[in-house]
Image (cartoon, rainbow, N blue to C red):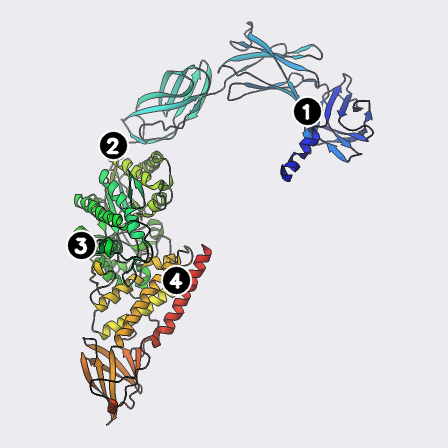
Amino acid sequence: MRIWALLLLAPALAWAQYAVTFSVSHDGYLTAYIAGIPQGHKVNLHWGVEPYPQGPWTVINDTTMSWNGENYTATIGPFKNGTWIAFVFYDATAGVWINYLGTPFWNWNVQINPPNVGATSVQVLPNCTLFITAVGRAPDVMVIHYGLTSGPQTGLAWSNATDAAMAYNPLWGNYTTIIGPFRPGQWVQWVYLDKSTGQQIANGGRDFAAQASCSPLSLGTAYPYDRYVYTVGETARISIPLENPSGPLDAAVVLSIGPLKAEKRAALSSGLNFVNFTIPIRIPQGVYKPVVQVLVGNATLLNSTLPQLYVLNTTGKPPVSLVIVWNMHQPLYVEPNGTWAMPWVPLHTGEDFKWEGRYVGAYELQAYLLSRFDVNVSIDFTPVLLYQWEALLAQGPQGFKYLGYYPGNITYDIEAVNRTLALYRELVEEGRVEVLTVPFYHPLEAIAYDNGWAGDILAQLIMGREMTYRLFGVNASCVWTPEMAFEMGLVHLYRAAGLNCTVLDAQAFLPSATYINGSQSPYVPYVVEDDEGHYVYVLFRDDGLSNIFSFYLFTLSDPDLVKQLLIQYLARVYMERPGAVVVVALDGENPLIFNSMTGPRDLYAIYDALSRYSGTWLITQTASQAIATHVKYAVTNLPESSWALNLDNWNNGYPGKVAIWRAVALAREYLVAFTKALGGRQSPAVQLDPAHIPNSTDLLQTLWNYLYVAEGSDWTWQTGPPNYGPGWFSLQPMIYVDAILRAINGTVAEVVPVSAKVGGGGVALSVENKLGRSVTLVLGSGGRCYEVVLKPGLDEVYLPNATSAQLDVYLPVDINDVPDYVVPPSACGLRIAAWAPPAASTKTTGVYASTAAPTAAGTYLPYLTALALAVALAAVLARRRR
């Protein structure tokens, strides 16, 4: 046995060696005896007077005890009748206190010749036994003599009369016994017998009596109603579960629902019983707390409240419209060289869990369940997810390149992509799924807009809309605002991209809006108008229900509870605001992926419940359907915010987040200048070939696509606090930034100074352009800037007034082109290289010698290195936090 167990048992083991008795004389003396202490010890009786058992002592004494050959004994008193005496023992020789049951502060408690002998309290226990406590003359032997009667004090003879011993409890100074069990409702009468004196103790000349008004019955756990919500006039079928642990009962079961009352006779057998009621619901709208009573004779065996019962009055009222908007999103998991770095897109499409005997992913399961139920939803398929699906189909299993060992069956997962897209296309064609779009790589639009990158946002919106059309054949009219991070400048961008509606968070935006008409409510569509008259329709999500979806419904192991919570929530909204538009908006895959054991069944339950209850008071609509069929309020001046109530999750000053934003700004700055040098279009809508993901056939288009990848919101969301995601997310944007800058550097290096001749008031320069296209550069010499257009092949350039062939090379850009610059452009532009061409005399036939100084890396490499180190440090810290 362990030492701690011995220590815990020590008081009980020590107590077991003692035997304590006492007696009380009629003239008020108390004599105490204790055995188990060796002869020859000095023993004291430590005693006091108390107002009640275990109460505070008001008189404290020590009386030396004497050895009588068997025990130590001491007599104290006399005391007045009714006095409470408490005592313990002290073995002074051994230095040991001896308390009742060996428990510190527990005493023996005795009332001296109590004047209220027979005073009784009765407790009916759940099993229909009677727990009886009585005052007696301690330590006399007491018994209870009891029998069964048909009522209290009937004067008739008892049946089944018997005796039961009563135990004296020294801790509380009373006698107790438990008799029974009895039949529910049975009357019991009794008297006490003091065997020590031969006295019968009655209740003032009458018998003591009590009714076993116990409730061995209990409500079962089964939900009693056949519907979660009733409408006035419907018939409710109510099945009340009753657990009966005792024998058969012939009972009356009474059900009360507000003013409705129904009663049934029921023969309740042992075990679980169901008592069924069929009741027309003809009561006012409300949430009721039905009460069930079970009566046997005049005894109430059960009086309990059933679960809440919902009643709706639908007369003349429009239904509640539920708009579910799923955001199906994955960032780009492909490296610039086309290698897949993470498995999540194919795995979440084909192998998240088993359903009906086969593996399915979250995306396929959504489509499969939607095809089975009559429910309308809106889904934002982020174009970057669709792009990766297209790439998987274009590559096939043989062309799929994964960085390391792929943890699934890629052939099966690619087949799942085909099945998933086919299911969604059918649902879109049927009009039961509205497809939303989103800026292609899910950027944090509010921050990008503040950075001056509006063109990038517009390009990604156009790219996203084109991707949606290519895969589903529809021109999306609604856009998902990534992370619901909105600011008013986005209104005109949405309209410019052909988009006229979005979904935002009610708590984040509505309290601060300026209302042109109507008032604050998340249950109506809004027209949000900017200062220039551009507008978009906005649905604001019900934050309460959206959070229940996100964090609770998919965690439940009871699908019926999922249905109940959802339908009754919507019923409460209907009671307060019939015709409301209730918007649930959240990530569509996360609740399933993060709750793989319960999520699939719970999603089935959600769609099943919505399909069953759609009709007079509830309908499901897509976002566009809800906007088209409901009155709209008008607001302006929405604040800059997100679902998180600010933008801190993505830009809170954490070094890793700052490093990513600065790196993206640096890459963008050089890409804008490089695009200008090549005569390209800034912020283009990139044309992509999924077979060559993530590259285009055109260099500039490829680099702008890289930039859009780096602008995605996932990278800063996962970096540092508060989310501390995997370090891979922190490094991925840096990989794309590095790819952009290396490509610019490598391209500029293809423009080679061949020779230079200084004299005649300037510099004559020969330059070979190996790019196969014209490029505009700015050459700096002696504080002067010379813009030159170099055609493919050998160019002869003259720089008037130049005095040196040592030239700085710039990309043509000014501060207005790059408002969020990292490297300040000079008067000549962004320095990209330094040339020191040889004198014209060193030229050799067919070979052009070049002593070019360090190229672009020499300019921006210190910035990029510092940023990369900051991100790497952040990734290390994140891993430590995890």
Which of pointers 1 and 4 lies earlier in the amino acid sequence?
1
Q: Which residue is pictured at 38% across the width and 73% down the height?
A: 862
Q: Is residue 96 left or right of residue 685?
A: right
Marks 4/3: CA distance? 34 Å
Q: Nearer the viewer, residue 660 or 18?
A: 18
Q: Nearer the viewer, residue 588 or 527?
A: 588
The answer to whether the residue labelled 4 contacts the one labelled 3, judged by CB atoms less than 8 Å apart, is no
Question: Is 404 left, or right, of 315 in this rendering?
Answer: right
Cα–Cα span, label 4 and label 2: 55 Å
Q: Earlier in the sequence, mark 3 or mark 1?
A: 1
Q: Position of residue 133 (x, y in %)?
A: 61, 20
714 or 297, nearer to the observer: 714
Residue occupied by mark 4: 657
- Is mark 4 in CB contact (under 8 Å) with mark 2? no
Can you identify the residue that label 3 sits on? 470
Q: Which mark is residue 170?
A: 1
Q: Quadrant of residue 861?
A: bottom left
Vertical relation: 161 (above or below) 707: above
Sequence-first tag of 2 and 1: 1
Name the front one of labels 4 and 3: 3
Q: Which mark is residue 315?
A: 2
